[in-house]
Structure formats: C-alpha cells, structure tokens
Image: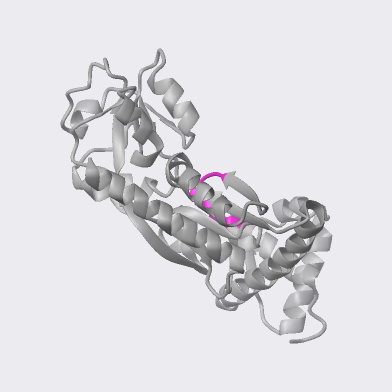
Amino acid sequence: MDRRIKFRHLEAFVAIARANRLKRAAEQLNLTQPAISKTLRDLENILGVTLMTRDRAGVRLTPEGQVFLQYAEQSTAALRQGISSIASHSEAGGHAVKIGVLPSVAAQVLPAAIEIFRGASPKTVLHVVEGSHGFLTDCLRAGDLDLVVGRLGDAATMRGLSFTALYAERVVAVVAPDHPRRGATRLEQLEGDLIIYPPEASAIRPLMARLMISRGVPLFADRIECVSGALGRAMTLGALRPVWFISRGVVADDLDAGRLVALDLDMGPTEGAVGIMARSEENPSPLVGLFRGALSDAAQSLDSGRAGH
C-alpha cells in the first residue's frame, strides 16, 4: 500500500460517494468544501486515476472509483470496528455486539434470539438499532454495526455484503377488525382508501411494486409512506382507518390477538427471505458468531411455531 494514503483520504472519498454531493459530505465530516475537494484530489493524484466526476446532479463514480469504493469502505469499517471494540471493552468491562434490525425482526425473532444469546453470554452489552434497510446496510458497511437482520434487499443495497437466509416472510394488508374493506379480496377494491405504504428505502417496497405491476394496479394515490410499526399500528386503529401494507412479522402478535385483521389478498409475489447481513470479507468475532447462532435457533423456533398453527 502507498504510504501516502491516509485514513482521511479514505474517509473523505467514502463520505462523498455516499452523500453524492461534496457540500453534504463536507458537512458530515465538519470540513469546508474546498478542504474535502483537495483531499479527494490528493487521493486521485496518489492513485493516478480519476475516482469521481462532477455534474449538476452531483458526483458520479468512475469505473475505477466503483472498484476502489468497496475496498475503501472495508478498510474504514475495519478500523472503526477495532476502535469501537477497544472502547466498549474499556467502558463496560467486556465486549459489545452491535445489531441492526428491521421492524419485522425486532417484533418477533430478535427477543427470542437475545434470550438465547444472554443465556450463553450474559455480560455482553448488546446495542440494537432499528431502521430502514438502506440506513442499516449503510451503517453495516461503515463498520457501525456488526450484523443486520432483515429482508434481503435488491442488488444495489447489498454491495459488499453477504446474506444468510433464516426464513421467508410475506407482506400482509391489515385493517382494524371493523373496517369496511375487511372483506376485500382484490387490490382494486382498495384504490379509494388511505393506504400506509412502504417507503422507497424499505426492503419490501420493490416486492410491493412487483405485486402491483403483476395485477395491473397503479401506485395508490392516497397514501402515507411509513416504516414505523408503532405509527402504522396507531393509525390503523385510529380515526383515519387506513389499510396498512407491512411485513407479517411486524403485526403477527396483533393478528393472533385479533387486534388487526389481514385482508384475504393473494400476496404471494411479496414473499422474500429474511436473514443475516454481514460484511463480505470479514471473519466474525466469537461473540458475533454466537449471536448468529442464537438468531438461527430463534428462527427455527419461529418456523416450528408457524408449522404448528
């Protein structure tokens, strides 16, 4: 490796690639725009290639930039992980595991996995972050998370990541028990209703798009785009009474208790794998490996419970 390449070069390059704007990346790193521009130029001069081009839409990675980004992300992530591991060991007297989860996993699989994991490693500190697929995978690539558990995203969101499937899950359309559309069997019957729909950053948005296209139904005009389980549940049971499209795991307990009802729609095209995402080239620590095992055991118990119903 060229000794002239410093961490600040890699950090600036990764920040610009993610933000797609020099100004935004400079703000994130508390730098001026001229300073971050010079850092990028210095890196390009050291490598002897152009990594990015600029136009009115922002910055674009060259083919060389796309190749270099993967390795720059891995390098900065590894260093941050090392620093974080030292800090967590000193502060908590032990190690920490940082997990990102999508809402459907947080509602069902994660509590069981944590119970199993704490039985084996009760003093390990767990940091759990819930969020959208895009946000969590960005954090994973940056080294801010050890694992992400959720639905498999499209190819663009999985760059530099591996995926291990745990189980499959569908999207459901749920309503309050006394909703006037409770008997709906076709998507067309919902076109005049208020819909809570997955936002673009969510993993189930492409699956819903595929379903709508296959049925010849346009995107619902009267919609609220939301990934929050708490907000979706409160609204569905509130005065506005929307129809809520959401992964079944988020509302499984509500369906079992009768607080919400799933419409009898054919949602087969929305079935997708739920699993563990990790950085591709990284060997997991023993604790991360232990948590992966706990997730697998919890998922198997969940599958057994479903089969028994």
Front-most of 303 and 282?
A: 303
The part of the image, by quadrant, that contains residue 88 is bottom right
| Relative image position of residue 256 (x, y in whole percent) | 31, 30
Residue at image point 80% right, 68% down: 8
Residue 58 position by quadrant: bottom right
Q: Position of residue 187 (x, y in %)?
A: 21, 33
Question: Where residue 213 appears, x then y in whole percent?
Answer: 24, 46
Q: Is residue 135 magenta?
A: yes
Residue 84 visible, this orientation: yes
Q: Considering depth in this image, is 15 or 52 the residue closer to the camera?
A: 15
Report which quarter residue 237 is drawn in: top left
Q: Is residue 122 left or right of residue 220?
A: right
Q: Is residue 143 magenta?
A: no
| Residue drawn at 76 percent across, 72 percent down | 41
| Residue 149 vertical placement versus 284 (above, below) | above
Q: Which residues are magenta?
A: 130-139
